[in-house]
Image (cartoon, rainbow, N blue to C red):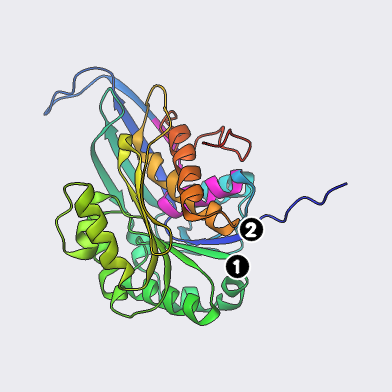
């Protein structure tokens, strides 16, 4: 009997919080109460990426901060149930982070509030004390919910241990935390911004495909091997220092219920592909496959995510 290939060991370092998502049933009317419905689920960029990776079969650990409260208990239990190693989930006094989003009837975000004060207090020592564990990973994934000093510590740790690192900018304001790191000249396997975050990272306007290519080349010049830019319903743009530039269409997603989990799923699929030995283009297609599943669900991670889904041609 053939031996099943060993799944990659991936450690995710980033945010974990409780997601509170409300969707308006009809046309949004400002300044008043709108009929609709609300769902709560475990969330956070790092946590969502970790759960997607676990559902794909990766051996995944999550390094994050959670509060000494019932929401923190809920996040730890759900992570264990999803197959995530919770050994590196650290408790702190204070409230576990929350993310509250209001969506329109088509599932597009109207407004969101992110309360990440707990992880804003993370120190570099919270990462470096686990350097031996992180160094044994096949791949590291960090998100910019981490304070800038922690992102710096993570980048240096990954470079010293020669472990590939994927960084997710999270948002335009938090992408600013990554800009000084690009001046360090240390290797970064991949950055996964959206169009606006790419503009923030490079200081360049990004309005069309030509702009995408130029901005990505600037990141390659600063040590980034792969740049994967999420473009929503249009799919994604991949720029690889060795494999060229490609537009990759999204798979048909069916009825869209919530777009907010799509980006995290794309990053997870891409990271899984890279850690499993796929080339960058194959890995990007894996990310699009997961993203299409994620936007069909109001949960932060689609319950049917798995590594048995049909591959794109």
The image shows residue 55 at horizontal and vertical percentages of: 60, 43
Q: Main secondary structure of the magenta part?
A: helix
Q: Is residue 303 magenta?
A: no
Outermost residue, left side: 31
From the viewer's side, name the closer residue of 101 and 144. 144
Q: Is residue 188 left or right of residue 73?
A: left
Q: At 24% across and 53% down in the image, what residue appears?
A: 212
Q: Is residue 87 visible?
A: yes
Q: Secondary structure at mark 1?
A: loop
Residue 48, magenta (yes or no): yes
Q: Start and end of the magenta stretch?
A: 39-55
Which residue lies at the image location 43% right of the left edge and 58% below the top edge? 243
Q: Nearer the viewer, residue 54 or 216?
A: 216
Percent coordinates x, y for residue 165 in the rendering:
47, 67
Left or right: 116 as drawn, with respect to 1: left
Number of the label disc, if any, that sits on residue 8: 2
Q: CA distance from mark 1 to mark 2?
A: 8 Å
- Disc sitting over residue 224 in the figure: none
**Residue 63 location, x and y as percent?**
51, 63
């Amino acid at each position: 009997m053939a031996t099943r290939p060993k799944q990659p060991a991936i450690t995710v370092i980033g945010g974990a919080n409780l997601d509170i998502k409300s969707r308006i049933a009809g046309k949004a009317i400002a300044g008043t109460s709108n009929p609709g419905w609300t769902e709560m689920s475990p969330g956070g960029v790092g946590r969502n990426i970790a759960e997607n990776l676990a559902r794909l079969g990766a051996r995944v650990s999550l390094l994050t901060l959670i509060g000494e409260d019932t929401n923190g208990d809920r996040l730890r239990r759900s992570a264990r149930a999803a197959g995530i190693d919770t050994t590196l989930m650290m408790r702190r006094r204070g409230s576990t982070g929350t993310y509250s989003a209001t969506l329109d009837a088509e599932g597009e975000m109207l407004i969101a509030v992110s309360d990440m004060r707990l992880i804003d207090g993370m120190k570099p020592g919270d990462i470096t004390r686990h350097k031996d564990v992180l160094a044994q990973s096949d791949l590291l994934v960090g998100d910019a919910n981490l304070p800038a000093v922690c992102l710096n510590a993570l980048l240096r740790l990954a470079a010293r241990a020669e472990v590939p690192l994927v960084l997710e900018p999270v948002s335009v304001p938090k992408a600013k935390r990554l800009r000084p790191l690009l001046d360090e000249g240390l290797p970064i396997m991949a950055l996964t911004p959206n169009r606006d975050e790419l503009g923030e990272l490079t200081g360049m306007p990004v309005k069309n495909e030509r702009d995408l290519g130029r901005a990505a080349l600037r990141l390659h010049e600063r040590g980034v091997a792969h740049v994967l830019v999420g473009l929503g319903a249009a799919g994604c743009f991949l720029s690889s220092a060795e494999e060229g530039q490609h537009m990759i269409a999204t798979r048909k997603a069916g009825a869209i219920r919530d777009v907010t989990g799509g980006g995290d799923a794309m990053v997870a699929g891409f990271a899984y592909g890279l850690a499993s030995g796929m080339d960058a283009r194959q890995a990007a297609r894996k990310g699009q496959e997961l993203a299409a599943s994620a936007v069909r669900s109001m949960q932060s991670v689609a319950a049917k995510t798995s590594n048995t889904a049909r591959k794109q041609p």
